[in-house]
Every structure is written in structure tokens, then in C-alpha cells.
Image (cartoon, rainbow, N blue to C red):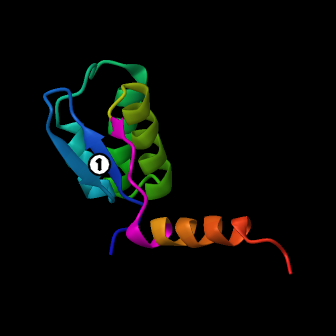
């Protein structure tokens, strides 16, 4: 089971991967980014490496990774799950019914 909610990363070269752990984040950092010299990318890479070494909380490293990916436009929006879509349909039908 993954520790974090999955993020879908779309690399500059068109490839993509799902990232849901620090190990995944490390692999994704090796992918094709727009700017590997950007301060947020460098901070994320350092924090992910520190988390792997046990000297940084994984949640902090994962948040830095997500921020760096978002700033470079690599985060792909996630589609809602099938269950959430069904809930939305039921919820919208209930709102249309008159009280009584």
C-alpha cells in the first residue's frame, strides 16, 4: 500500500508515471523535467534523498516533490474515482428532489 495519495507526473518527453512513495519520487526526479536547476527541483531532490537516508520526514519530502512538479507543470490532474463519480450523481439527484 502506498503511503501517499498517488500523483500522476507527465514528463517533458511525454512519458508519465504514478508517484505514491518516496522511492517513486526518487525515480521521477530522474525523469525529464523542464529545469533540473530550478531551486524547487533541487530542494525536492535533496529532501527526497534525505528521506531515503532517514534524516527527513517522508511527508516533507513528498510535499516538496509535489510542489516542484506543480511549478514545472508536470502534475496531471487526476480523474475522480468511479465511486466518487457515482456519489456525485446520487448527490446531484437528491438535490433536485423537492423536500417533502
- Verify whether residue 38 appears in magenta: no
Residue designated by label 1: 25
Residue lying at 24% horizontally and 37% vertically, measured from the top left: 10
- Of 76 and 33, the residue lying toward us: 76
* For residue 34, above or below residue 92: above
* For residue 67, above or below residue 4: above
Image coordinates for residue 17, horizontal then vertical, percent: 21, 48
Image coordinates for residue 23, horizontal then vertical, percent: 25, 56
Image coordinates for residue 79, horizontal then vertical, percent: 38, 53
- For this orientation, the residue located farthest to the right is 100
Residue lying at 36% horizontally and 58% vertically, measured from the top left: 6
Q: Disc 1 on helix, strand or loop?
A: helix
- Of 8 and 45, the residue lying toward us: 8
- Of 81 and 97, the residue lying toward us: 97
Q: Is residue 60 left or right of residue 73?
A: right
Magenta residue span: 75-84
* For residue 93, above or below residue 50: below
For the C terminus, give its image quadrant. bottom right
Instruction: Tell me if mark 1 has few (under 14), some (14-19) or many (20+) residues whose alpha carbon lies within 10 angstroms of its own.
Output: many
- The mark tally for this picture is 1
* For residue 3, above or below residue 48: below
Q: Quadrant of residue 58?
A: bottom left
Image coordinates for residue 91, horizontal then vertical, percent: 63, 69
Residue lying at 27% horizontally and 23% vertically, measured from the top left: 36
- Of 96 and 31, the residue lying toward us: 96
- Verify whether residue 78 appears in magenta: yes
- For this orientation, the residue located farthest to the bottom is 100
For the N terminus, give its image quadrant. bottom left
Amino acid at each position: 500500500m502506498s503511503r501517499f495519495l498517488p500523483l500522476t507526473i507527465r514528463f517533458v518527453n511525454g512519458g508519465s508515471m504514478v508517484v505514491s512513495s518516496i522511492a517513486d519520487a526518487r525515480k521521477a526526479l530522474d525523469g525529464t523535467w523542464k529545469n533540473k536547476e530550478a531551486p524547487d527541483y533541487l530542494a525536492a531532490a535533496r529532501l527526497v534523498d534525505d528521506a531515503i537516508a532517514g534524516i527527513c520526514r517522508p511527508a516533507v519530502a513528498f510535499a516538496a516533490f509535489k510542489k516542484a512538479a506543480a511549478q514545472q507543470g508536470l502534475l496531471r490532474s487526476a480523474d475522480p474515482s468511479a465511486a466518487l463519480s457515482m456519489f456525485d450523481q446520487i448527490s446531484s439527484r437528491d438535490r433536485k428532489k423537492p423536500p417533502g
